[in-house]
Amino acid sequence: MNMMAKATMLLLAVGVSACTNPDRLGGGAAGAGGVGAGAGALAGSASDPTSPAYFSQAIGDRVLFAVDTSTLTPEGQRILDGQVQWLLTNADYRAVIEGHADEQGTREYNLALGARRANAVREYLVSRGVPSSRLEVISYGKLRPIELCSNEACYAKNRRAVTVLSFSAATS
Amino acid sequence: MKRILTLLVALILSGPLTAQTGPLRLTITEGVIEPITFAAPVFQAENAQATQFANDLNRLVAQDLSGTGLFREIQANAFISQVSSFAQPIAYADWRAINAQALITGAVAVNGDQLSVKFRLYDVFSGQELGGGLQFAGTTAGWRRMGHKVADAVYSRITGEGGYFDSRVVYVAEGGPKDNRQMRLAIMDYDGANIQYLTDSSTIVLAPRFSPNGDRVLYTSYESGFPRINVLNVANVGRQQLQTAPGEMAFSPRFSRDGGSVIYSLSNGGNTDIFRSDLSTGQYTRLTSAPSIETAPSLSPDGSQIVFESDRSGTQQLYIMSANGGEARRISFGEGRYGTPVWSPRGDLVAFTKQHGGRFHIGVMRTDGSEERLLTASFLDEGPTWSPNGRVIMFSRETQGETGASALYSVDISGRNIKAVPIQTAGSDPSWGPLQP
């Protein structure tokens, strides 16, 4: 990890945090099911750029999608660029990308749609140099919303792909 | 689960069942019908221990029949005659006078933990018995099944179709808040009685599906950390993971008609297609290969075709292809999105979930896509499953908002008789099993 890359990452992080809401993202441990359960314990301090807390809060651990799409938005791509830099810097972390959908849709279709979203994120990260061996995908469909209301304000936040970190010293 | 009941079916009368030529016949159509009226005087208790069972069985039979919406019970306070003996001749005039079209009499005996119930069905207006007397025997613990058997026989004799009361439903029992729903597999009688839990709530479980003979259940579990299909043996609750084609997620399984293989969806690299795996060899076959989402496969009763959903046209729609894959033809052309198709056991209809204008519906259409009819409408209805005789559909209905929760409902295919299935918890993803032997 060289200083140049780290500086680039910090700049990106600032750019991102300016247009996202740390309170909303701060919950971090989207931890749907067992996979992300360790994320809270890993979090560390948000002021430490090598910490998962920094990853989820300053960089942004999630990207959002329009209704029934898996296309990355320009803002989503900026967040993922930040994730790429962080993952390349902190090579001891692996990630599971969780795809989610809002509640408008059947369970089965939303599982498949969540898989599309998670894969859109994985493909983007891999295309920017993150080894695919460090990334896994999973979909929860509409089973794990973070916002509970039944209107677009909540749906918009539930249509997401969350990059959930896990520590793994022996990464390839 | 222990087999609690051995059923003995015996003709009480000598001689075979007579052909039903009397006028008491209800043809189930999709239009509005006038319910058949019936009287069911309390069954005779043949000994003291049988008194409570005679009463309970009588009520259960009446509930089963009334619950269909096809039958209406005449209350006992209207009766002119009483039936004091199972063998006594019927005073038809007294039952005609209160406009009871059918009369059901019964007798119950209990010996230790053994129980037997016999019944007769009379066509009041033509003044004759409809079919012969029947007797069912089993344990007192299994008394509800014997009541359902009696009701199935009555339903069958009057409608000429198979019944559905002595059947079970597997579903997902839900609890906890919307953002941390606890889910476990549960099995119950069709009417919500005798609930048993098959898994704990330590992981997400989804969409259980009965095998054709009811001995096993397929479901999707996140037990391994990722969605995988499990096969659960209902009798001993043992389970094992289905060997699928390689992929990131496997879900939406259904048994083949012979129970020997499974059709399901597999996601890999973000693309979801339909596969079939043989349960004994683990060999798999890819049935679709398109960049779109293909999921929710359901076989025709003869096993030759698969109805499924795909968004290859840009939105979710229903398609039919050969059970071996290949070219598919679209059958849904109405407005909105169509998902979760399920082929009726009678073969004539496909039930589906439709999403249109911010509402969800359960509907049915013919297998060529014609005669679409929506049976329900709500904020969120989904996941239809057919009764064994193809006359009733059970589904999940979820309410909206922060306290939103899912419940099980049933509706007959006319759409007139919609009602909640009483279970103790929230519930979703029902799968209706076969009529029990």
Image (spheres, rainbow, N blue to C red):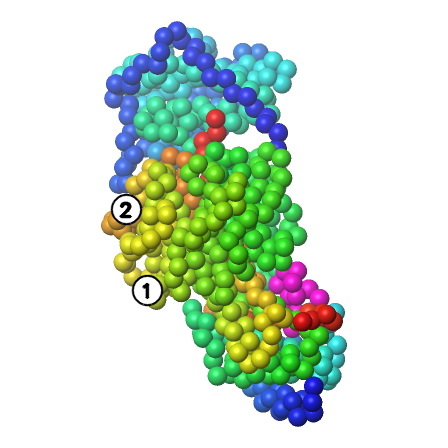
Figure check: B259 above or below A65: above
Q: Which mark is residue B366?
A: 2
Magenta stretch in the rendered image: A27-40
- In the picture provided, is B223 more to the left or to the right than B285? right
Between residues B238 and B38, which one lies in front from this camera angle?
B238
Measured from the top left, where is residue A26 in percent x and y?
A: 65, 76
The residues bearing labels 1 and 2 have C-alpha atoms spaced at a distance of: 21 Å
Chain letter, disc 2 residue: B
Q: Secondary structure at mark 1?
A: loop
Asked if badges 1 and 2 are on one and the same chain, I answer: yes
- In the picture provided, is B151 more to the left or to the right than B157? right
- Residue denoted by label 1: B313
Residue in the picture at 29% in, 61% down: B335
Q: Within 10 Å of the Cα at label 1, are there few (<14), some (14-19), or many (20+) other Cα atoms? A: few
Figure check: B226 above or below B385: below
Measured from the top left, where is residue A124 in percent x and y?
A: 52, 77
Pointer 1 or 2: first along the chain: 1
Q: Quadrant of the N terminus of chain B?
A: top right
Q: Is residue B8 visible?
A: yes
The amino acid sitting under disc 2 is: Arg
Measured from the top left, where is residue B265 in percent x and y?
A: 46, 54
- In the picture provided, is B418 more to the left or to the right than A78? left
Residue in the picture at 27% in, 58% down: B333
Chain letter, disc 1 residue: B
The amino acid sitting under disc 1 is: Ser
Q: Is residue B82 visible?
A: no
